[in-house]
Image (cartoon, rainbow, N blue to C red):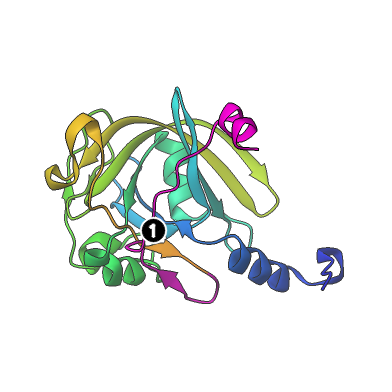
Amino acid sequence: MHIDPAQHPASDNYKLLTNLVVPRPIAWVTSQSGGSVVNLAPFSFFNAVGSNPLFILISVGHHDDGSLKDTARHIEASREFVVNLVTEEVLLAMNMSAADFPPDESEVSAAGLSTAPSVHIGVPRLAEAKASLECRLHSQQMLGLYTIYIGEVVMFHVADELVGERLHIEGFNPIGRMGSPAYYCRTTDRFELARPSYAALKKGG
């Protein structure tokens, strides 16, 4: 079947895109500006996009009236944020934090969570997260009704039990976002497939 997005409303195109580009990691972002409360919100338009320097990207949609969401306002004001990764232990808290809380109420306390100080930035991380990435804003770009924020990772926080020899991460099973409206997946089923070299492929042929 051929589906031309120009012939469909944005809601249908969103459904197609988010159901096909899966699974997606979840950026559970803590942000804060000035003396404001700590905001916590999940975003699944998120991924790592560079390793030297270390860059991650999150895409934050606007409110229906075009105004910025709390996360976006805080990032633009402070130029700092933390990406906390979502595992099974905090799945329900993540889902609760996706509700439309007012700006003066923190999702952190409402979800029964707590924060811990970051090392290089002023925005705190989630104490309950098994992995968190402290980020400084590198750049941003408007894309339609979304704003892309590229952050440089300046500190990793990883639970001790996950770090093996030579910094291999072991036993880390984050939750992935599947399609709308509310589908997720576990990442416990894994397999290894070594990447071949061109020379080996030619020799085998």
Residue 24 % position (x, y): 49, 57
Q: How many marks?
A: 1
Q: Residue furthest top?
A: 52
Q: Vertically, is 106 above or below 144?
A: below
Q: Residue furthest left?
A: 160
Question: Residue drawn 54% across and 71% down?
Answer: 179
Residue extent of the magenta highlight: 179-205
Residue 11 % position (x, y): 69, 72
Kind of residue at disc 1: Ala
Q: Vertically, is 106 above or below 58?
A: below
Residue at image mark 1: 41
What secondary structure do most residues of the magenta stretch adopt?
loop
Between 29 and 7, the one nearer to me in the picture: 7
Between 164 and 149, the one nearer to me in the picture: 164
Q: Is residue 100 visible?
A: no
Between 155 and 172, the one nearer to me in the picture: 172
Residue 101 % position (x, y): 38, 68
The quadrant of the picture occupied by the C terminus is: top right
Question: Residue drawn 59% across and 46% down?
Answer: 147
Q: Quadrant of residue 32?
A: top left
Is label 1 in a helix, a strand or a loop? Answer: strand
> In this rendering, would 177 be left or right of 205?
left
The crowd level at tag 1 (other Cα within 10 Å; few <14, some 14-19, many 20+) is many
Question: Residue drawn 64% across and 71% down?
Answer: 15
Question: Residue drawn 33% across and 72% down?
Answer: 96
Residue 167 % position (x, y): 23, 33
Q: Vertically, is 104 above or below 140?
A: below
Q: Vertically, is 40 above or below 125?
A: below
- Magenta stretch containing residue 187, yes or no? yes
- Magenta stretch containing residue 182, yes or no? yes
> In this rendering, would 70 be left or right of 87?
right
> In this rendering, would 186 be left or right of 110?
right
